[in-house]
Amino acid sequence: MSEVTVNSTICDFVHKIRGSKQGNKIIVDIETPCEKIEKFSHMEIPIKEIMDIKDNYVMDRAQEAKCCSNCLVPCAVLNLCRLESGFLAKSLAKKTGSLSIVFD
């Protein structure tokens, strides 16, 4: 099981994303105060659908929910899926700690 927290400071929401690999899928649940994110807060994501940034299950669900283009949640979900599927080392993610966008 992997967990990530997304601090969406622009919209002032904090989202908690949890996921675990079950067979050839990643089961993801999102605790969120955002109505748009709530629309896709439970997903069973096929592992083969997380590799391409454009054509993948998560981005399709975010588009259907009409997420803003600056929403960090879809990216966080994809990173969590990569952790759970072994394409991103959990030790590297833990060492790095966070990703960020800084507006200068």
Image: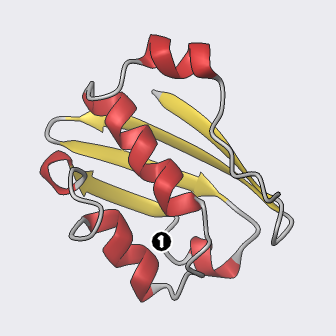
Please tell me whether residue 23 is drawn above or below residue 27 in the rendered image: above
Please tell me whether residue 98 is drawn above or below residue 70 in the rendered image: above
The kind of residue tagged 1 is Phe
Residue 33 percent coordinates (x, y): 76, 68
Q: Is residue 47 left or right of residue 86?
A: left
Q: Nearer the viewer, residue 72 or 103?
A: 103
Which residue: 62% across, 72% down?
Answer: 70
Residue 101 percent coordinates (x, y): 69, 52
Q: Quadrant of residue 25?
A: top left
Q: Is residue 64 left or right of residue 53?
A: right
Q: How many marks?
A: 1
Which residue: 29% across, 61% down?
Answer: 53
Q: Is residue 18 left or right of residue 51?
A: right
Residue 28 percent coordinates (x, y): 43, 49
For the C terminus, the image quarter is: bottom right
Q: Which residue is mark 1?
A: 40
Please tell me whether residue 95 is drawn above or below residue 46 in the rendered image: above
Classify mark 1: helix, strand or loop.
Answer: loop
How packed mark 1 is, by other alpha carbons closer than 10 Å (few <14, some 14-19, many 20 or more), is: some
Which residue: 36% across, 47% down?
Answer: 27
Residue 45 percent coordinates (x, y): 27, 55
Q: Nearer the viewer, residue 71 or 28?
A: 71
Please tell me whether residue 19 is drawn above or below residue 42 in the rendered image: above
Which residue: 21% across, 70% down?
Answer: 55
For the N terminus, the image quarter is: top left
In this view, which residue lies farthest toward the front? 104
Which coloring applies here?
A: secondary structure
Q: Nearer the viewer, residue 53 or 46?
A: 53
Q: Is residue 10 left or right of residue 24?
A: right
